[in-house]
Amino acid sequence: MQARVIMLVDLDYFFAQCEERRNPSLKDKPVVVCVYSGRSEDSGAVSTANYIARKYGVTSGIPIFLAKKKLKKKDAVFLPVDHEFYEEVSEEIMRILRSHADLFEQVGIDEAYLDVSQKVKGSLEEAKELAQRIKEEVKAQQKLTCSIGIGPNKLVAKIAADIQKPDGLTIVEPEQVESFLSPLPVSRLIGVGRKTKKRMQTLVISTIGDLAKYDVQRLIEVFGKKLGIYFHNASIGVDDEPVQERGEVESISRISTLKGDTRDLKVILERANQLCDEVHAKLVQRELGFKSVGIVAVMVDMSVRSRSKTLENPTNELEVLKKTVKELFEKFLNESELEARRVGVRVSNFVKEQERQKQITNFIGLAKN
Ligand code: DCP
Ligand code: CA
Ligand code: CA
């Protein structure tokens, strides 16, 4: 088998960078994105922070009050997480990344593996140029920076991407893998959490190089067969995991706040139809047909109501979507007294558009016989 060329693209300080993009005046200040628990004013944890805030020791997971203490009198900005917005930015960027890959695998909201072996004909030189193009494209179209790691497998690509941040590009040639990994702490390996790290420390293993030198049989005795072998292979940079499209999208939805609170069907449908257009555009992009349609409404008292309908046959038609959404809102308004503040549209129960066409063709074929 020819050597693979794998990239891991990870967006820099993602949530905070999205906030900077939305409001560029934040760029020269410490920015902290917070998950407020709501129990008291500053209770909750830091989701992420920009690199200015990180200089003061603010990192993901620390309590908000602690971050405030560290950033006292630093003109820092604290913002609540806005998942919906980050999801939207993420989707756009993933579309760019996907277009450059032979095989694509998104992992989490802000990173993805790209197998580019064929695209670059196995050449690391070309892979480097491709990575630079990707960075430029993401920057030009989405105004965000990312860090990219390139290596012969996912394990090496991931660690390479983490080495130089933000806006980094790190390439590890197959011959360099062991020397690249060996000085790094074992905690860089996926699967080595705090507990495993402690356990390894008692075996006098602190770097990946230490782990590589450690007898495999002993590792198996300590960690069990599966993990022991995994740790050994990981330590020498061996990883055969393929890059594969994972977790097909479960649903596509859009939600939006109305200009004023209302229960006027016409006003609601005007907005809902726009949302249908957006949802439909995503469906087309992903080549999906849908079988279920749902609506959601956030009422003036902040309660959330939803209704859904499953169609007899999958479709990809915008008109069917709009018609069903209309039906659902009509019915919903008849059953509810309150005014709506936000409305949303969702489709789910997907079939690949190709499959759907095939089914239709088969059906017609059958009908003819
Ligand atoms: N995140 C979170 N809580 C955590 C870790 C992460 O809410 N404990 C969220 C916020 C991050 C996003 O996930 O922006 C991506 O996580 P990363 O680990 O990739 O971290 P960042 O993108 O924020 O920073 P980096 O530049 O180090 O990649
Ligand atoms: Ca990131
Ligand atoms: Ca990440």
Image: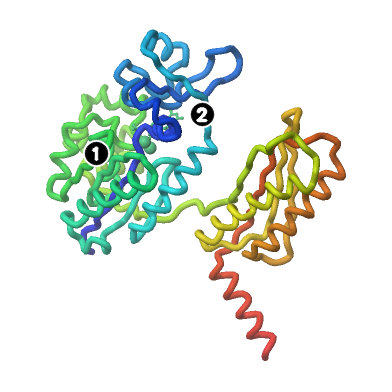
Residue occupying the point 52% across, 25% down = 80
* Location of mark 1 (residue): 168
Q: Residues within 10 Å of mark 1 (few under 14, many from 20)?
A: many
Labels 2 and 1: the sequence-earlier one: 2
Identify the element where label 1 is drawn: loop
Q: Is ligand 1 within 8 Å of the beta carbon of the residue shown at mark 2?
A: yes
Is 58 left or right of 165, judged from the image as shown?
right
Q: Disc 2 marks which amino acid?
A: Val
x and y percentages locating residue 115 in the rendered image: 31, 56
Left or right, residue 268 beside residue 119: right
Could you tell me how many numbered marks the image carries? 2
How far apart, in angstroms, are the residues tagged by discs 2 and 1?
25 Å
Query: What x and y, as percent, mark residue 212?
Result: 19, 38
Looking at the image, which residue is at 36% across and 54% down?
243
- Residue 110 at least partly seen: yes
> Residue 139, image x and y in percent?
33, 44
